[in-house]
Image: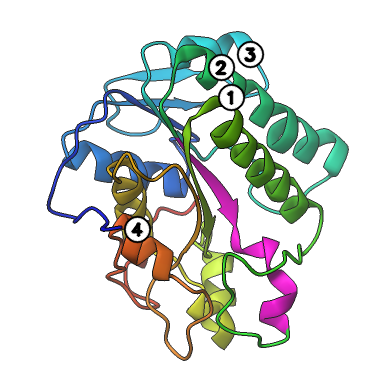
Amino acid sequence: MAGTSWGRLRPVGRILVTGSSGCIGRAVVAALTRRGHPVRGFDRVAGPALPEFVAGSITDPAAVDRAMEGVRCLVHLAATPDDAPFTTELLPNNLLGVHHVLESARRAGVGRMILASSGQVSWWQGQRGEFPVRPEDPPTPKSWYAATKLFLEGIGRSFAEDHGISVITVRLGWCPRTAAQRREIADTPWAQDVYLSPGDAGRFFACAVEAPETVRHLVVYAASRCRFQEAFDRAAARDLLGFEPHDTWPEGLEDGLEE
């Protein structure tokens, strides 16, 4: 199946980006806006230059429903982004919040969901040097955070099968949010092969939004170009979605803002 090209726009209707004020969220909003798509942001605080925005938390079903009105495509990024206390952060944000967002999208008639998972769901293959890690390989989650992302992947598959919604789940590489994370990547050769620049993140999600309607369920990896060896098998992202990364570590860092 041929993927979309970066130069061709496929109108999809209004797009809701949850977590729109985060590092990846800002990049995704910018990429979609440049492509001419109507974008609505949803986050606890507003990000820059978003004409349509709803403030709220994914743990609040009423706020999620307000944000979902008139939406045809969902980009779900909002989550606690790494290991954190399970009962107070991961449980409400990465499990209960997923329930609220996906059920609201289903009720609203959203036709495509693009769900942000993590490369940490295949952590131990990478630590053993079993490269490239493929989407079909058995998951080996790092810890509780990665386990919550497997929950997201599982219910995404269920929505595709049970409700006929096009669901694209992306296992994201490492898009550093802070100066400390940038230093860690700089000091860790393997991390440079799973680096995802903000610009490449925006390009990936634009390709996923505009992918052909024949893409019904897909799990893919998204990372920038490797420096040493291919950590993730990115063939599906290339062949089915038309995504080709532009950057190699440390290119593109200037596009991400420290939090």
Q: Earlier in the sequence, mark 2 or mark 3?
A: 3
Tell me if mark 3 has few (under 14), some (14-19) or many (20+) residues whose alpha carbon lies within 10 angstroms of its own.
Answer: some
Residue 128 badge: none
Q: What residue is shown at x 44% (from left), y 16% (from top)? A: 109
Q: Which residue is mark 4?
A: 240
Report the number of discs: 4
Give the label on residue 104, or none. Answer: 2
The CA distance from mark 4 to mark 1 is 26 Å
Name the residue carrying label 1.
101
> For the residue labelled by badge 2, is the local secondary structure a helix, a strand or a loop?
helix
Which residue type carries mark 3?
A: Pro
Q: Tag 4: Cα neighbours inside 10 Å, few (<14), some, or many (≥20)?
A: many
254, above or below 17, in the image: below
In contact (CB < 8 Å): disc 2 and disc 3: yes
Q: Residues within 10 Å of mark 1 (few under 14, many from 20)?
A: many
Given residues 160 and 172, the one toward you in this image is: 160
Identify the mark nearer the N-term, 4 or 1. 1
**Range of the magenta residues?**
113-127
Task: Establish if 61 lies above or below 178.
Answer: above
Tell me, for residue 61, which label it has, or none.
3
Residue toward you, 222 or 183: 222
Q: Secondary structure at mark 3?
A: helix
Residue 129, horizontal then vertical, whole percent: 66, 88
Mark nearer the N terminus (4 vs 3): 3
User: Mark 4: which amino acid?
Assistant: Leu
For the residue labelled by badge 1, is the local secondary structure a helix, a strand or a loop?
A: helix
Q: Is residue 121 magenta?
A: yes
Q: Nearer the viewer, mark 4 or mark 1?
A: 4
